[in-house]
């Protein structure tokens, strides 16, 4: 079961042009700030504070979240929420690829 879960789990890829997470793909130039969500705020971000227009890729067994604001005024998506094992690394990668 663990092997199947590992093989089928979605990947988050940040390259020079875009961010891809599962079926979500968005160009870096359309993104704003990336924020690491502290564990005490995870329930709020996925519950009462969640915008219905947000795109999300959340796994129940991962308790670290990254919220990436969407800066493109043409995109109705306000932000993307991704669960990950390496939230700080993802925020760092997004920051490095935007400069």
Image (spheres, rainbow, N blue to C red):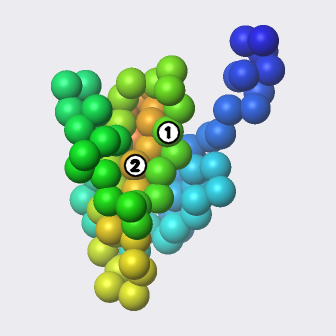
User: Which quadrant of the rendered structure holds the N terminus?
Assistant: top right
| Res. 15 image quadrant | bottom right
User: Which quadrant of the rendered structure holds the C terminus?
Assistant: bottom left
- 62 vs 24, left or right, is left
Q: Residue 63, how many percent across, how many down?
A: 39, 24
Is 33 above or below relative to 87? below
Any part of residue 60 in sight: yes
- 4 vs 10, left or right, is right
Between residues 81 and 20, which one lies in front from this camera angle?
81
Q: CA distance from mark 1 to mark 2?
A: 7 Å
Q: Residue 18, how many percent across, how many down?
A: 53, 64
Disc 1 is placed on an element classified as loop
Q: Earlier in the sequence, mark 1 or mark 2?
A: 1
Q: Residue at x 53, y 32 (%)?
A: 59
Label 2 environment density (alpha carbons within 10 Å; few <14, some 14–19, many ≥20): many
Q: Residue at x 46, y 32 (%)?
A: 84
Q: Residue 69, how many percent across, how many down?
A: 30, 62
Which disc is residue 81 wearing? 2
Label 1 belongs to which residue? 58
Is 14 above or below relative to 52? above
Between residues 69 and 90, which one lies in front from this camera angle?
69
Which disc is residue 92 wearing? none
């Amino acid at each position: 079961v663990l092997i199947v879960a590992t093989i089928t789990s979605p990947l988050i890829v940040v390259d020079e042009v875009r961010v891809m997470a599962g079926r979500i793909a968005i160009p870096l130039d359309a993104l704003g700030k990336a924020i690491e969500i502290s564990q005490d705020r995870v329930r709020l971000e996925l519950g009462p504070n969640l915008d219905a227009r947000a795109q999300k890729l959340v796994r129940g067994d991962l308790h670290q979240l990254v919220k990436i604001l969407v800066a493109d005024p043409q995109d109705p998506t306000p932000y993307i929420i991704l669960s990950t094992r390496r939230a700080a690394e993802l925020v760092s990668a997004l920051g490095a690829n935007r400069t």
